[in-house]
Amino acid sequence: MLVKEYRICMPLTVDEYKIGQLYMISKHSCEQSGSGEGVEVVRNEADTHPQHGPGQVTEKRIYLSSKLPAWAKAFAPRFFYVTEKAWNFYPYTITEYSLSFLPKFSVRIETRFENNNGSNDNIFGTPTPAEHVSFLDILSDPIPEKHYKESEDLSRWQSRKTQRGPLEEGWREDHQPIMCSYKKVHCSFEVYGLQTKTEDFIHKNIRDILLIGHRQAVAWVDEWHGLSLEEVRQYEKMMQQKTNIKVKQSTEAAMYSHRIQLTSSSNALNTKCRPSIRFKIKQT
């Protein structure tokens, strides 16, 4: 099992991000859905934890077959989804990922939010070894080129509602307000010969997702700042319905296209393998 801790600072307060997180996840999920992939929301309901109090529990199906590297596609079905179960007892959350066809695969993310610049080394009770702690900078750390948008570049960003931005080098040292998302990620894939490669691949993708999502939460602040919890829950419900429709339509289209390809390949193979029969007409 590979365990890493990520710390991602934002020019927000923990109270503000309670709204921003819900807005960002809903909008991001809808934007990333299509072409046979995306996030389908199966369950989203209130829940109460005996220790952490009232919160929300969600279950999602994440379709992402085309994002797999070639070596992983060798043992994955053509169409599959990752099951995500999340318990949001803000400012504490737990998220778990699993695959039905790979019982030895699991990812668990424990998250805590605090109003500081990532200075709490003991936020999870037991300090994470320094070599396994990574600070992710939403201003300067690179993200995949296909995800770059000038409107989400925080060196150019300026919020009309909050009068914050743009961010400058070293902003985490003295910016106010500032908060930090502390994420402890447990990744396990106990398959001989593939464990290290798979766990490294998963952590790289988690790193990219964390950078993109936190950048967007800040860049979109003027869209969600000032919304009440009830208003953002209504937005969340609307976007989930829209996203589910997109995922259903795109996955059905992708599966139909795949069946057509299989049928065409099968017909071509049958034609090629069919014995040739020639008739010779005897002349009299």
Image: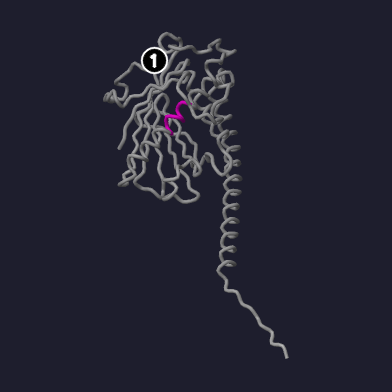
- Residue 185, by quadrant, is top left
Of residues 71 and 117, which is closer to you in this image? 71
Where is mark 1, residue-wise? Answer: 117
Q: Quadrant of residue 232?
A: top right
- Rate crowding at label 1 as few (under 14), some (14 to 19) or many (20 or more) other CA atoms within 10 Å: many
Q: Which secondary structure, mark 1?
A: loop
Residue found at the far bottom of this picture: 284
Q: In which quarter of the image is residue 231?
A: top right
Estimate the x, y position of residue 264 in percent, counting from the top left. Answer: 60, 59
The residues colored magenta run 205-211
Question: Which residue occupies the foreground of this view, 22 or 78?
Answer: 78
The C terminus, quarter of image: bottom right
- Whether the magenta-drawn stretch holds residue 149 is answered as no
Rendered position, 121 above or below 209 = above
Left/right of residue 183 with respect to residue 18 in the rendered view: left
Residue found farthest to the right: 284
